[in-house]
Amino acid sequence: MFVNNNDITNLIARIQYKSAVGFSVALGISLYGVYLYLKRKNNIIVNLLNNAQIVVVNKETSNLDQLAEILLSHIREQPILGFDCEWITEGKKRRPIALLQLATYKQFCVILRLTQLPDIPKTFKQILANENVLKVGVCPTQDANYLYHDYGIETNGCLDLRHLTNESLGLANLSKKYLNFVMNKHWRIRCSNWEADILNEAQITYAAHDAIIAVELFKKMRQLSKHDNISYFIDAPYYSKKAIDKNKVSCKNVTKKSYESKISRLPLRKSPLYSNCVMLAPDNEVLCTCDKKKAEWYIHKNLAHLVKENPFTIKLNFEPEGRAVGESGEYYKVAKLNRCVVCGCPDSYIRKNVVPREYRKLFPIIMKEHSSHDVLLLCVKCHQKSNLSDIVLRNKLAKLCDAPIGAGNVKMYDSPAARELKSAAKALLRASDKLPQARREELEKIIFKYFPGKVEITKSMLETAECVATSIKNDKYEPHGKKVVDYFISHCNPNYQNELGTGGLTELEQLWRQHFLEVMTPKYLPEHWSVTHNKNRLEIRAGEGRINLEDLKIAGCDENLLISKT
């Protein structure tokens, strides 16, 4: 049903019966005619539409935060959202996304008219960015990419339903096959004006069904799927067999892409990365090049003054703690070009973390400082190639450090017993009188196992069993990145060579940099870029007495450098 101003309060009362909130939405269209039509087409629609509630949000809608709270209340129970977008295409060119559809497992659907909204509330953005809230649909990673490109909205936790079946079917065909429900995909609606001042009944129904049915499909497919763990597929684009044949890629490689690659939604930079502003010491020695915002911050804080506009140059009003020394120091002084470091493409580029963040974020602060050395610019094609090649090294590290990726190392795992209990409770609550006696007695035995000592099954017992959590926390879970970092720290010994070289976190950095050089063979690296950059920098700091012994050990640098010169 559609929700209008008159019954929105009742809706909130049903969804959030513990809070009395009220807000208005700009819509008042009945779904009854569409409901009767679809009911004649297929009985399954009775279950889908009886509970469906659709809210359209536009510029006239107030209290969006309260609407978001309804979504949150459903997400807390089941962190799943049907996710879809609609837009107009003019002359083969896509216009910005017009509609964003989000549907909960309770068939509550919110349609956000993005082209009419001045901004999206913070809560909605947090829901979209939360990787623990699953956004299901067909091609959700593509929609997430467009959302970021058009509105700067980050979306994580996307799952393409086709991964669960490995069938290259659209949403309508999946719905027909798994739900026995025929969706209305007429081209006149699909290609209609999604930016119109007022959406008609058919448009709203079409948009809402895409999100609602995505959730229904997920629930059905999850029961049938052979994949015990779907974490591999999160934020991974689906590659059809046709795409595989066209690109002559092996099925094995495509599976790796599906598991690991997130490149389809990485945004292109809209502005150059390097401003190449110059920072001078009080004696006019060049300290480094920096971003213009950083340079202006120094001036604003009266820590520096402007020397000249072109190139933008500032001079510090104080003596810095340290200066750029040696080859590693020279790297920060040279200007860097805004182009792909592999092929030299100057038109479009994405930032590449040569040492992935899942490892870098766990380094000590002194090793995370000046990390710009490992942030390089790549064009889209080179970025894709580099990301796919990274899977090889990650798998090697997983084996070396006993740090499995995905399967066997998950935060939560399903409990078959809890799932059986939940299923039995649902059946007895909803269809007890329709079940054969033998089946009903079988289900009751399952309930009695959970409530030992009880001689009679009550409604409250079934309701309790229906709400039991089917996911159990894995107390042995440890992130892959943490296990790898801990392994390199525990195996560091600067005094002799081992299977890692000398070990330590600088060795981990060097493995990633060397891997990047060997796979990508970059032709346009910044001057003074080096595989041993951070180790050289830290050893210089040790010679100046500007690093503590513990950090030096973790890095895998020679401790004698610090002891002999302090």
Image (tube, rainbow, N blue to C red):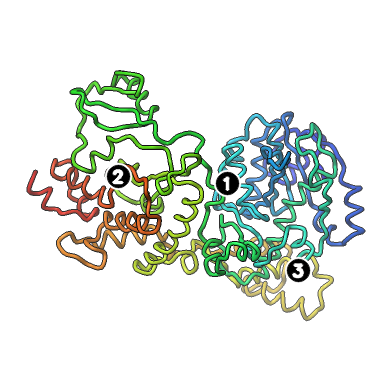
Image depth: mark 3 or mark 1 in front: 1
Q: Which residue is rendered at x = 68% and y = 61% of the image?
A: 218
Q: x and y percent of residue 104 in the render?
A: 69, 51
- Horizontally, is 133 left or right of 60 in the view? left
In the picture of the structure, the residue carrying the numbered disc 1 is 155
For marks 1 and 2, the one nearer the N-term is 1
Categorize mark 1 by other alpha carbons within 10 Å: few (<14), some (14-19), many (20+).
Answer: many
For mark 3, what is the residue? 428
Gap between marks 1 and 2, in whole Å? 28 Å
Which sits in the foreground, 271 or 485? Answer: 271
Residue at the farthest left position:
564
Measured in 3D between alpha carbons, the distance from the residue under mark 2 to the one under mark 3, in whole angstroms, is: 57 Å
**Three-letter amino acid code of the residue under disc 2:** Ile
Q: Is residue 421 above or below residue 69?
A: below
* Residue type, mark 1 in image: Thr
Going by the numbered disc 3, the residue's amino acid type is: Leu
Q: Is residue 317 above or below residue 102?
A: above
Position of residue 100 measured from the top left corner of the image (x, y, whole percent): 69, 42
